[in-house]
Image: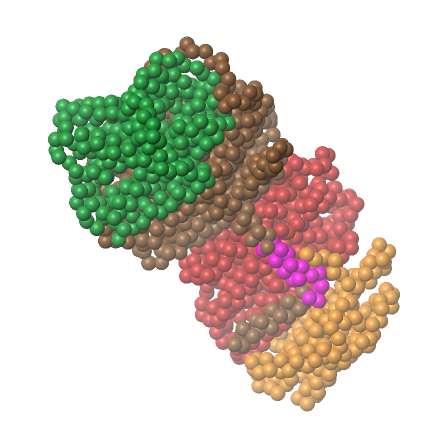
């Protein structure tokens, strides 16, 4: 139990680092790190079974390596500016992050874990990570930061998935499919940025369609 | 039954047809006396009518058959209306529940055709007269209805015979007397309006711009004009009958005495009109609607008194 | 058999990639979807057994399957004509994507397993993204981006909801399975807090896909920028599929004895959708965005119908069919109008009835139909819905719904009448009605008209069965 | 009943064959005319046999529709509305053959006929339906067909606007009816109309208010009349006749039918209708007086007459609340008879106005003038209609108003109750009558009399016989009811018996409503008029009409010096300015040697232009503001909504 909880605490800390970071590359690395840490979670929870190891490997390769690599490549190739452009400042974002984390802990009391998982920080950590992901989605302007937020949201869901990984083998792997979507996003941006037709248009904003 | 009906019909018509023009004479005479003149003889209206009926027609080339419909309706309507209203103590020959509405709407019909006939000439002056006529009458109409409601409240039927029955004498002495007094005043005002008398209209004026009724018939001539004048006289007598019966609700039961009382009352009314015409000035035209609305309010007050 | 229904569109999609002729590739669409329609009707009337633990059909899914298939067939026919005049864009992406989309929708409808259903819904998102991006311009990429991002967030939340439901089973000590029948059978023993939270996330997740306010925000952009036939498929087909997914949650909650809570939440969201749609329809200058908000409105009505329960559920089921078909007709007609004027804004569109006698008339008729005017089908379903609302003594809800419907009518009427009536400014339109492009909307509107005066007994029975599924108490 | 179904089908589909004919061929219109005539004849036959048999006729067929059956029911109440419908539809369709011929209107002729048939059939259907869904279907098909009739000439901006307002108003009304029937079906347990006089009063408040709104909107009760003036003015004249003569009466039918279902009537229902009726009547006619567009003017008169009808219905309702059978009988008979009468004379007026418009090419009264010489038949028929609508004897309008007057006098017999206030209906009616008279003097005088006011009017031609004959038929019907009202007694008595229920019904033939006497007075009046008129005519026949009108000393009068519609109405309109807010332009004559001056007045609709439009504009602005804020294009913001939804729902869950 000690290992899982310290892992989850680390995940929570990374949330704050990501929320507070002003550099895009740092953000991506943080999220990659979070994914890598989460890859440790299945073995930590269920012991070193083959299934857990497979899940860990999948998470590590997708969350920890492949998608961050795609994102970094996108930044490089499309020459996206390296700064995070916040809609609201970093400090307020972090305060909001703290508040939502507190809210996650409060709400987690309403969702009782079974005795097997008792005393784990699974639910609050999952909710807090999700909310942190949402905060990234909501408070950052660039499409690429929104992808990061989405990744973080997924990391939160993954934590819950880990709880069920032994009971529902197929389901959690399916969750990893979500990552595929992210790949599609990134590719979409990359392909279109490369397309000359769009070279003059600010796809970082994407807010022309409105009432 | 039939005989009595016929008798009543004939006596009504005789009284009406013979006596109506005389009222005009009485009014003119009263006014002359007030003006310090001898004035035309009492029977002058008859002479006028006789002369007009002998004259020939002149028609404007603008006019159509509608132009002649005015005089026709103007004459027929008072004739028919007279059959619905009791002449003093003499009950109306035709009487049924709700005939009072017919009575009012018959005059509406005559107003419609008089106004339309005036418009038929295409003259702006006659158009002006038509406007004033319909405007003032339509403002006077609610007053009549309020008065009739008061009368209907006091009686137990909805025919003019029942409304103007012998119970009026008791009503004058009861609490409702005040209401009756009020509606008497109101109806007198309506009578003046409907018959185009001072202070609402001046039948003897010579300036077309200030006329109402007279200007509408400017283009009529000969027998048509005669019919109009005769119709106007009949109308005054018929409306006057309502007023006289209300003011003098006595009834002897004898034909002759009732008829004399009625004629006396009518003459008195004519004198009163003459007095009013001699002592009052014409109202400004924009003031007329205000006076009429005021009269309606008086009538409402009377109604509230009896409904209480 | 059902598996075949899901797989063969994929096969045809593969074939279409291999076929070298443009027209032949286009015609693969109606051919495939006709077969699909035939098979799904046969399945729906019980010609083939279609039950199983992973995929199977019940009364609800039969209904949605046939409607979706029918709508797809119409759109496929339209697509042939459409792709013919859009040779500049090619059909190498459109055709296979449409077929994959069809397959994914079929899977989502027929899945008896929440996880499988979730995957299928996600597959619809991915396969429809290129369809929205069909026009390849600045606005369409933005619309696609928003569609993908918001729907993905939603789908992630739905995933969380499903996980919660699974955990509810774990917490309740029952066998952990996401198989619907098992869940329903053990519903009473599920752990309540997890179940409730799971339902909420499921609702928000699939609600995003369905377009309940305030989760609808991608709709106007996506519907507005996508070709008319894609809009028709999204508004009529995909929303119904997502609604079915939500209904699975409602079924579960009802079976667990917490149906009232689920219904309250649905009612609240439905009312909110209706009100928001009303606000957005007033003086809406863009005919396609207007249709998108109309879709939000009708999703709200569906949610309200299920939220009220009883006879209103029946009304909602009927409305699902009517809405799908009418929306299909409206979007296709709107697509034609947009083509003729090269604009979808009423500042440019005038006298569509004169320019496009058939499409313009269909657009007007579709407007009358969708706003609930007899003798069109939505009248019957809306009226049944309202009877349900008033029958359950919720006068305030009923009056609110009526008020919103009135505002929606005013707003929509302003736009539609401005577009269809009057004299067109340009004498020679860019585009004239052609049979392939008006046949499908015409058939949709006629079908809706038929449903307004005659609802066959088997259909009524099916609707009653579907509504009854939602009322199964513990 | 099979005849009625046949009639409905034939009428409804009458315009369909025309769709397959060439744009300029006569075939379509002739077939449509024939089908409609056959259809109405079938319907008339069905109604007549039902009335003669004295028993209500029923038809019930199964229908695959949730809660619906194809249930038709014919009783005297429905018959009262159906009979004028058949006549007006039939006359209108014949009139339309020459008024709106296909070859002159290739673009919209077919559309007009299609929807003319559709609206007629739908109205027959709804008047005979006894199932909620069937009624609503008929209702809405009628409403929408009405919309397409109004927008026949949709290339005109003004027409589109009128149609738009109509469509919105009617749909708002229909939505209220949705709720109404939903509530009714809940109260009675099924969508069939419940048996008359069985519904309890409990919980009926909302039902009545919804009915008042929904049906009142269609009927055009002030202040719900907003759609009416524009719509009637915009439609082709025979369509206007149908809309004004029949369609708005379906609103009254709805109210009559609705109130017949309840066992007891709360007194405030009657008071409400009475009050609304008085407002509609007085304001309607005052607004009419202020209009100078002949069809708009006639449309406002519809508001006025609906007011009169509502007064009658209000009195009848009061009679039921206070258990006064005479009041019920007089009020309802007046109401229903006025429904018939208004249908007849208003159609007549619209048709004759149509032939004037057809001849002159304008709707402005001030462009007409002197038409009686050029259109003697049209003019005479219009005059008949004008006399009838002004409720003057011996035409039919007088009879129905007379019944309502008698009803208004009834409360006087019951001193103790609060009912006394109801007598105010009588002076209100008198005022309405006076104003209507003034208005029709204006219309008839300015249109048909005097000298032509425009070149077009000077060269106007008489309408063809196919247009005159339908009008003559309508006038004959007006005169028939005016002179022989007793022939309608069985119909009215049947309707009263069917409506009044537990109050106990009084039959009209009684001493309190001696229609025979009125009839006699009418004949007497007619005879006297004819005799006098004939004598005068004989004496004046030879006189040449060769002098100019007396110009009061002015030497060169021109036709422009005639009284115009604006100046005619001015003195009366000024009295009602508190409610009309007329806009007056010019009219001031400055200085000793004044320059050219002119006067005109223009009266916008008090409710629509002064209240609703500003309110709508404000709402629209608010909506647009909210819209721009909510849907602001920022994906981040949209995702915020998702989070907020999750948080809100979770909060709901934990609370």
Query: Left or right of C348: which side holds B279?
Result: left
Chain in red, by letter, is C
Chain in brown, by letter, is D
- Give C279 or B286, whichever is nearer the viewer: B286
**Which residue extends farthest front?**
B36
- Give D297 or C65, whichever is nearer the viewer: D297
Could you tell me residue D328's position as x and y percent? 28, 44
Could you tell me residue D161's position as x and y percent? 58, 41
Decide if residue B163 is in sight here.
yes
Measured along the vertical axis of the image, is residue B289 above or below residue C93? Answer: above
Chain in orange, by letter, is A
Chain in green, by letter, is B
Q: Is residue B137 magenta?
A: no
Residue drawn at the location 47% of the way across and 57% of the way down: C399
Residue drawn at the location 79% of the way across and 70% of the way down: A85
Q: Main secondary structure of the magenta part?
A: helix
């Amino acid at each position: 139990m000690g290992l899982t909880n310290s892992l989850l605490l680390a995940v929570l800390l990374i949330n704050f680092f990501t929320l507070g970071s002003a550099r895009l590359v740092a953000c991506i690395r943080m999220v990659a790190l979070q994914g890598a840490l989460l890859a440790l979670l299945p073995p930590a929870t269920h012991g070193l079974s083959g299934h857990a190891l497979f899940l860990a490997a999948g998470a590590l390769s997708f969350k920890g390596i492949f998608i961050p690599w795609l994102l970094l490549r996108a930044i490089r190739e499309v020459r996206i500016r390296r700064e995070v452009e916040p809609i609201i400042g970093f400090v307020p974002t972090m305060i909001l992050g703290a508040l939502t984390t507190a809210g996650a802990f409060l709400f987690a009391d309403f969702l009782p874990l079974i005795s097997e998982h008792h005393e784990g920080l699974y639910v609050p950590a999952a909710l807090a990570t999700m909310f942190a992901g949402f905060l990234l989605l909501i408070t950052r302007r660039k499409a690429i930061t929104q992808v990061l937020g989405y990744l973080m949201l997924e990391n939160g869901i993954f934590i819950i998935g880990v709880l069920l990984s032994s009971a529902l083998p197929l389901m959690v792997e399916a969750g990893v499919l979500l990552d595929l979507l992210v790949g599609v996003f990134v590719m979409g941006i990359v392909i279109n940025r490369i397309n000359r037709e769009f070279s003059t248009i600010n796809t970082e904003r994407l807010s022309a369609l409105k009432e | 039954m039939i005989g009595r009906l016929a008798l009543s019909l004939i006596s009504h018509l005789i009284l009406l047809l013979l006596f109506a023009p005389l009222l005009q004479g009485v009014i003119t005479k009263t006014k002359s006396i007030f003006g310090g003149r001898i004035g035309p003889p009492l029977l002058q209206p008859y002479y006028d009518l006789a002369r007009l009926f002998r004259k020939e027609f002149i028609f404007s080339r603008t006019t159509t058959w509608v132009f002649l419909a005015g005089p026709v309706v103007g004459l027929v309507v008072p004739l028919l209306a007279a059959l619905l209203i009791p002449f003093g103590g003499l009950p109306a020959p035709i009487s049924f529940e709700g005939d009072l509405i017919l009575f009012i709407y018959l005059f509406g019909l005559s107003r419609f055709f008089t106004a339309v006939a005036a418009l038929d000439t295409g003259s702006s002056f006659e158009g002006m007269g038509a406007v004033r006529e319909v405007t003032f009458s339509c403002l006077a109409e609610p007053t009549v209805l309020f008065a009739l409601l008061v009368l209907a409240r006091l009686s137990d039927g909805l025919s003019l015979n029942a409304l103007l029955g012998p119970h009026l004498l008791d009503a004058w002495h009861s609490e409702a007397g005040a209401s009756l007094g009020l509606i008497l005043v109101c109806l007198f005002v309506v009578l003046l309006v409907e018959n185009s008398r001072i202070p609402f209209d001046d039948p003897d004026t010579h300036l077309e711009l200030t006329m109402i009724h007279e200007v509408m018939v400017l283009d009529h001539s000969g027998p048509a004009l005669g019919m109009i004048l005769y119709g106007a006289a009949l109308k005054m007598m018929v409306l006057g009958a309502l007023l006289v019966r209300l003011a003098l609700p006595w009834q002897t039961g004898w034909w002759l005495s009732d008829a004399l009382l009625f004629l006396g009352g009518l003459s008195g009314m004519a004198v009163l009109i003459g007095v009013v015409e001699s002592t009052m000035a014409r109202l400004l035209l924009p003031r007329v609607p205000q006076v009429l609305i005021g009269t309606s309010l008086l009538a409402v007050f009377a109604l509230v008194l009896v409904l209480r | 058999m059902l598996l075949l229904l899901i797989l063969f569109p994929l096969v045809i999609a593969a074939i279409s990639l291999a076929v070298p002729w443009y027209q032949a590739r286009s015609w693969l669409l109606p051919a495939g979807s006709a077969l699909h329609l035939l098979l799904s009707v046969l399945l729906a009337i019980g010609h083939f057994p279609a039950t199983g633990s992973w995929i199977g059909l019940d009364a609800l899914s039969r209904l949605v399957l046939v409607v979706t298939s029918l709508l797809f067939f119409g759109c496929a026919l339209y697509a042939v004509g459409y792709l013919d005049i859009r040779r500049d864009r090619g059909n190498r992406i459109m055709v296979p994507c449409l077929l994959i989309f069809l397959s994914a929708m079929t899977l989502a409808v027929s899945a008896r397993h929440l996880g499988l259903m979730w995957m299928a819904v996600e597959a619809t998102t991915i396969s429809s993204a290129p369809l929205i991006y069909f026009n390849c311009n600045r606005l369409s990429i933005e619309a696609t981006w928003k569609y993908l991002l918001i729907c993905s967030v939603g789908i992630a939340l739905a995933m969380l909801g499903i996980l919660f439901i699974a955990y509810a089973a774990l917490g309740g000590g029952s066998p952990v399975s996401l198989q619907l029948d098992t869940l329903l059978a053990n519903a009473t023993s599920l752990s309540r807090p997890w179940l409730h939270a799971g339902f909420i996330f499921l609702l928000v997740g699939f609600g995003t896909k369905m377009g309940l306010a305030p989760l609808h925000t991608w709709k106007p952009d996506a519907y507005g920028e996508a070709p008319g036939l894609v809009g028709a498929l999204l508004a009529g087909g995909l929303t119904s599929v997502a609604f079915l997914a939500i209904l699975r949650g409602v079924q579960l909650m009802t079976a667990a004895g917490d149906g009232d809570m689920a219904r309250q939440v649905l009612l609240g969201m439905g009312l909110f959708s209706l009100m928001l749609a009303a606000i957005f329809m007033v003086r809406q200058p863009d005919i396609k965005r207007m249709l998108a908000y109309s879709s939000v409105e009708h999703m709200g009505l569906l949610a309200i119908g299920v939220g009220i329960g009883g006879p209103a559920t029946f009304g909602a089921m009927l409305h699902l069919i009517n809405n799908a078909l009418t929306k299909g007709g409206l979007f296709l007609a709107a697509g034609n109008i947009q083509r003729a004027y090269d604009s979808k804004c009423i500042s440019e569109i005038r006298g569509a009835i004169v320019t496009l006698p058939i499409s313009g008339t269909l657009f007007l008729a579709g407007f009358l139909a969708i706003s609930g005017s007899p003798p069109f089908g939505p009248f019957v379903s809306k009226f049944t819905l309202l009877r349900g609302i008033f029958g359950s003594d919720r006068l305030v809800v009923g009056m609110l719904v009526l008020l919103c419907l009135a505002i929606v009518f005013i707003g929509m009427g302003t736009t539609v009448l401005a577009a269809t009536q009057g004299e067109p400014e340009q004498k020679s339109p860019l585009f004239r009605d052609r049979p392939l492009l008006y046949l499908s909307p015409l058939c949709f509107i006629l079908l809706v008209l038929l449903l307004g005066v005659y609802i066959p007994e088997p259909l009524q029975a099916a609707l009653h069965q579907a509504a009854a599924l939602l009322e199964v108490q513990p | 009943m099979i005849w009625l179904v046949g009639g409905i089908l034939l009428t409804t589909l009458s315009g369909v064959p025309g769709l397959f004919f060439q744009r300029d061929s006569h075939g379509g219109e002739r077939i449509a005319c024939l089908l409609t005539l056959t259809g109405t004849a079938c319907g008339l036959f069905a109604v007549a046999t039902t009335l003669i048999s004295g028993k209500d006729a029923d038809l019930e067929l199964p229908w695959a529709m949730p809660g619906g059956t194809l249930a038709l029911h014919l009783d005297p109440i429905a018959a009262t509305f159906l009979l004028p419908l058949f006549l007006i539809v039939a006359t209108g369709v014949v009139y339309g053959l020459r008024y709106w011929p296909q070859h002159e209107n290739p673009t919209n002729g077919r559309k007009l006929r299609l929807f003319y048939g559709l609206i007629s059939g739908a109205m027959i259907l709804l008047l005979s339906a006894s199932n909620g869904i069937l009624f609503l279907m008929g209702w809405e098909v009628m409403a929408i067909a009405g919309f397409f009739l109004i927008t026949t000439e949709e290339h005109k901006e003004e027409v589109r606007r009128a149609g738009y307002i109509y469509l919105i108003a009617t749909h708002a009304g229909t939505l209220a009816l949705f709720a109404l029937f939903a509530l009714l079906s809940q109260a009675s347990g099924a969508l069939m109309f419940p048996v008359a006089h069985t519904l309890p009063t409990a919980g009926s408040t909302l039902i009545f208010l919804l009915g008042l709104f929904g049906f009142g909107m269609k009927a055009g009760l002030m202040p719900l009349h907003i759609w009416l003036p524009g719509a009637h003015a915009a439609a082709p004249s025979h369509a206007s006749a149908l809309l004004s003569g029949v369609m708005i009466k379906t609103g009254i039918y709805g109210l009559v039918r609705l109130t017949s279902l309840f066992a007891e009537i709360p007194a405030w229902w009657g008071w409400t209708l009475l009050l609304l009726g008085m407002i509609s009547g007085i304001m309607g006619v005052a607004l009419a007086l202020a209009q100078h567009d002949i069809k708009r003017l006639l449309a406002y008169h519809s508001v006025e007459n609906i007011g009169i009808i509502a007064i009658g219905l209000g009195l009848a309702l009061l009679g039921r609340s206070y258990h006064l059978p005479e009041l019920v009988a007089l009020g309802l008979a007046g109401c229903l008879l006025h429904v018939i009468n208004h249908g007849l004379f208003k159609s007549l007026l619209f048709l004759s106005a149509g032939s004037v418009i057809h001849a002159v090419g304008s709707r402005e009264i001030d462009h007409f003038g002197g038409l009686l010489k050029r259109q003697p038949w049209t003019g005479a028929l219009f005059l008949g209609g004008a006399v009838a609508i002004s409720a003057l004897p011996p035409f039919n309008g007088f009879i129905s108003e007379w019944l309502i007057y008698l009803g208004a006098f009834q409360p006087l017999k019951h001193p103790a109750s609060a009912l006394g206030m109801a007598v105010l209906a009588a002076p209100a009616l008198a005022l309405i009558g006076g104003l209507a008279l003034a208005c029709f003097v204006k219309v008839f005088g300015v249109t048909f009399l005097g000298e032509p006011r425009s070149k077009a009017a000077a060269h106007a031609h008489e309408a063809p016989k196919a247009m005159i004959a339908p009008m003559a038929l309508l006038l004959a019907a007006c005169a028939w009811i005016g002179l022989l009202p007793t022939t309608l007694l069985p119909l009215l008595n049947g309707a009263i018996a069917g409506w009044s229920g537990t109050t106990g019904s009084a039959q009209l033939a009684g001493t309190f409503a001696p229609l025979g006497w009125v009839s006699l007075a009418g004949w007497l009046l007619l005879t006297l008029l004819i005799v006098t008129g004939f004598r005068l005519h004989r004496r004046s026949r030879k006189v040449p009409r060769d002098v100019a009108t007396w110009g009061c000393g002015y030497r060169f009068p021109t036709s422009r010096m005639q009284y115009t519609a604006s100046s005619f109405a001015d003195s009366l309109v000024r009295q009602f300015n508190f409610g009309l807010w007329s806009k007056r332009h010019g009219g001031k004559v400055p200085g000793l040697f004044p320059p050219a001056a002119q006067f005109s007045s223009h009266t916008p609709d008090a409710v629509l232009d002064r209240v609703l439009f500003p309110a709508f504009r404000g709402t629209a602005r608010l909506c647009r503001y909210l819209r721009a804020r909510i849907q602001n294009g920022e994906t981040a913001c949209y995702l915020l909504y998702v989070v907020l939804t999750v948080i809100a729902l979770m909060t709901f869950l934990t609370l």
